[in-house]
Amino acid sequence: MTVATELPAVPDGAPDGAADPLAVEAQVCLAMSAASRALVAYYRPLLEPLGLTHPQYLAMLALWQHGDLTLKALAGHLHLEPATTSPLVRRLEALGLVSRARSGDDERALAIRLTDRGRAMREQAVGIPAAMLDGLRLDLDQVAQVRAAAQLLLGACEAAEARRS
């Protein structure tokens, strides 16, 4: 992945040699937001046969990978707050893909478990990552570079937020 190191062009009327730090095309947040929306939109037709939204798909991926999880642990894997994750899990439960129950170890914790139907759906979903690579015409190295850049930014944002608190 090539990272642009040049500042955006100076807008008309700006002093000579001055770059505009507020130029919209220079903002990392715009690039990340637009890429995220485009990626989720590209997933949509691949997820429709499963009856899942993109956030639901991510939750299922975490459960297929890790097995039973508490609501808090699932939220952590998804980089979401438990309050945001709870309605998502309720919708997965309504689809018959997961069950929710109070943990036997800790009554305060909500255990999320895949149902037989939820486990079986994994076989239907196994081709989605390859379909994404093929459709986007990206190779594994390019995807690894994009993921690494996104994780670098995520880590920097989380560290900055922790310092702010």
Image (spheres, helix red, strand yellow):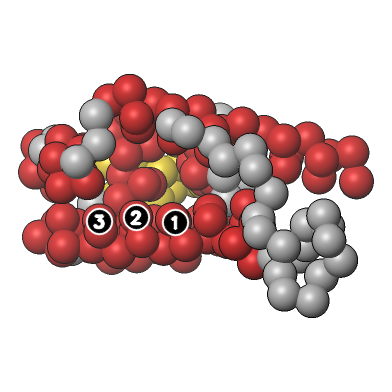
Give coordinates of residue 130: x percent, y percent.
Answer: 15, 36
Mark 2 and mark 1 in contact? Answer it, CB < 8 Å: yes
| View extreme (right): residue | 164
Determine which of the numbered discs, if any, sits on residue 36 in the image. 1
Identity of the residue drawn at 53% across and 53% down? 32
Task: Describe the element under mark 3 as helix, strand or loop.
Answer: helix
- Residue 70 appears at what percent x and percent y? 50, 39
Give the total of numbered labels: 3
Please give the residue where the numbered disc 2 appears in the rendered image: 39
Q: CA distance from mark 3 to mark 1?
A: 11 Å
Tell me the distance, in whole angstroms, between the alpha carbons under discs 2 and 1.
5 Å
Amino acid under label 3?
Tyr
Relative image position of residue 91 (x, y in whole percent):
34, 65
Circle nearer the N terminus (3, 1)? 1
- Report the residue that reaches farthest toward the front: 16
Q: Is label 1 in a helix, a strand or a loop?
A: helix
Amino acid type of the residue that numbered disc 1 sits on in the rendered structure = Ser
* Amino acid type at mark 2: Leu
Tell me the quadrant of the picture where the N terminus can be found.
top left
> How many other residues sit within 10 Å of disc 2, few (<14), some (14-19) or many (≥20)?
some
User: In the rendered image of this protein, does residue 65 appear above or below residue 162?
Assistant: above
Disc 1 residue crowd, few under 14, some 14–19, many 20+, Cα 10 Å: few
Q: Is residue 47 visible?
A: yes
Q: Is residue 15 left or right of residue 109?
A: right
Q: Which residue is mark 3?
A: 43
